[in-house]
Amino acid sequence: MSFASQRAHVLHAIMFFFALLDAQSSIAAANQIEQRISRLETGVRAEEAIRAVKRLQHTYAHCLDFALRPDFSDPLTQNAVGQSPTGTTTGKENLGKHFMEQDGRRALRRVNSIRI
């Protein structure tokens, strides 16, 4: 094998090595980006949940301030959990009963104009 062909093989090996390093760094960069996106998505979901709770609290307070009496359990899911000074209440139906007890009611009185 001549010196020129040996030199060409060495150059090809070096080029392959750098291409391999570049591919590995690209994979590492892609993994870092995926991890960052995952963290951002988790943060967005948490912020959306906080905003939903604040909207619900605002609506509840607005209804109490203006003596509106909707069924406050309507926007809740079936497996909702509520915590209050009197304890923990589980389930949409039980939370509805809890809200009525706190409001001094025994039956529902609907207001159709409340929007959460």
Image (spheres, rainbow, N blue to C red):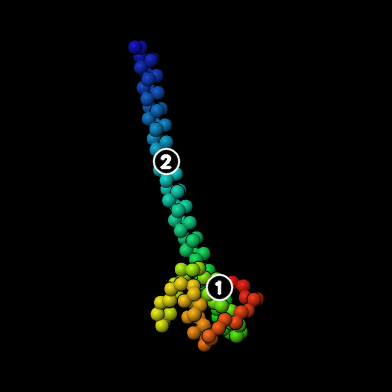
Q: Quadrant of residue 67?
A: bottom right
Please say whether residue 62 is visible from this viewpoint.
no
**Horizontal placement of 57 versus 5: left or right?**
right
Q: Which amino acid type corresponds to the residue marked 1 in the rendered image?
A: Asp
Q: Which residue is mark 2?
A: 27
The answer to whether the residues at label 2 and label 1 have Cβ atoms under 8 Å apart is no
- Please state the horizontal and vertical placement of residue 65, each as a whole percent of the image: 58, 84
What residue lies at 51% left-to-right and 77% top-to-bottom? 96
- Please state the horizontal and vertical placement of residue 13, each as a whole percent of the image: 37, 25
Q: Which amino acid type corresponds to the residue marked 2 in the rendered image?
A: Ile
Which residue appears farthest toward the right when viewing the image?
113
Q: Quadrant of residue 84?
A: bottom left
User: How far apart are labels 2 and 1 at the CA level?
Assistant: 48 Å
Q: Which residue is mark 1?
A: 74
> Looking at the figure, which quarter contains the C terminus?
bottom right
In this view, 18 is above or below 79: above
**Horizontal placement of 103 versus 18: left or right?**
right
Report crowding for label 2: few under 14, some 14 to 19, many 20 or more residues within 10 A (C-alpha).
Answer: few
